[in-house]
Image (tube, rainbow, N blue to C red):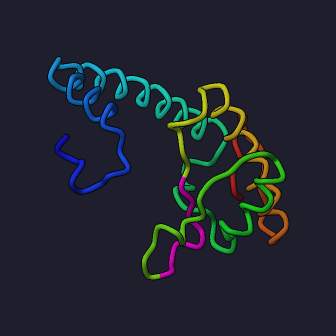
């Protein structure tokens, strides 16, 4: 009941359950399971990025704005956070934040493939040649 004086909205029962969970030493075991699950998803995303998107694109090519790309990606049922939201100085317009914690490994593969198609389309629109090579988008 340590949190109750600070926040009356948290259920007393929930607090007791968490206390018992911690007292039983279950947190470390759960953290290890969580780490393993997220590692597998992270590895799946990195692998999909390597297969579908030019590895030099840690940032999007100059002239390709992530916010504008987001509109195209949403139309393909893919979402990401445009990079400006992560840059306090307003920079990062050609960067994006991708999430691997929620989607399944299969969904990650599909989403990254669709994102590559959106990037390729965006590059064509700004006059930068983009070609598909070995299931990846490469900027020429």
Write the residue at 71% across / 58% down: 140
How many numbered dots are placed on residues in this image?
Answer: 0
User: What is the chief secondary structure element of the magenta stretch?
Assistant: loop
**Identity of the residue furthest to the bottom in this view:** 89
Quadrant in which the N terminus appears = top left
Which percent across, then down, holds residue 52? Answer: 67, 40
| 107 vs 62: above or below | above
Report which quarter residue 7 is drawn in: bottom left
Return the x and y of residue 65 as percentages of the image width and height: 67, 71
Reply above or below: 140 against 85: above
Q: Residue at x 35, y 21 (%)?
A: 33
Residue 43 on image: x %, y %:
47, 30
Toward which corner of the image does residue 21 lie, by quadrant? top left
**Range of magenta residues:** 90-97
Rendered residue at 60%/27% (across/down): 104
Q: Is residue 91 magenta?
A: yes
- Viewer-closest of 25 and 60: 25
Residue in the picture at 25% in, 19% down: 29
Q: Is residue 48 left or right of residue 77?
A: left
Compared to 22, does 52 lie above or below? below
Q: Looking at the picture, how far across and down is residue 139, in whole percent?
A: 69, 57
């Amino acid at each position: 009941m340590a949190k109750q004086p600070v926040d009356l909205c948290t259920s007393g029962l929930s607090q007791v359950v968490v206390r018992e969970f911690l007292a039983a030493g279950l947190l470390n075991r759960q953290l290890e399971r969580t780490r393993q699950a997220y590692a597998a998803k992270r590895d799946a995303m990195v692998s999909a990025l390597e297969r579908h998107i030019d590895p030099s694109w840690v940032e999007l090519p100059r002239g390709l704005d992530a916010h504008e790309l987001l509109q195209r990606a949403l139309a393909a049922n893919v979402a990401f956070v445009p990079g400006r939201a992560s840059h306090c100085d307003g920079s990062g317009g050609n960067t994006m934040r991708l999430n691997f914690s929620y989607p399944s490994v299969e969904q990650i593969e599909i989403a990254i493939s669709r994102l590559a198609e959106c990037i390729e389309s965006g590059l064509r629109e700004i006059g930068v040649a983009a070609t598909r090579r070995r299931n990846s988008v490469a900027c020429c």
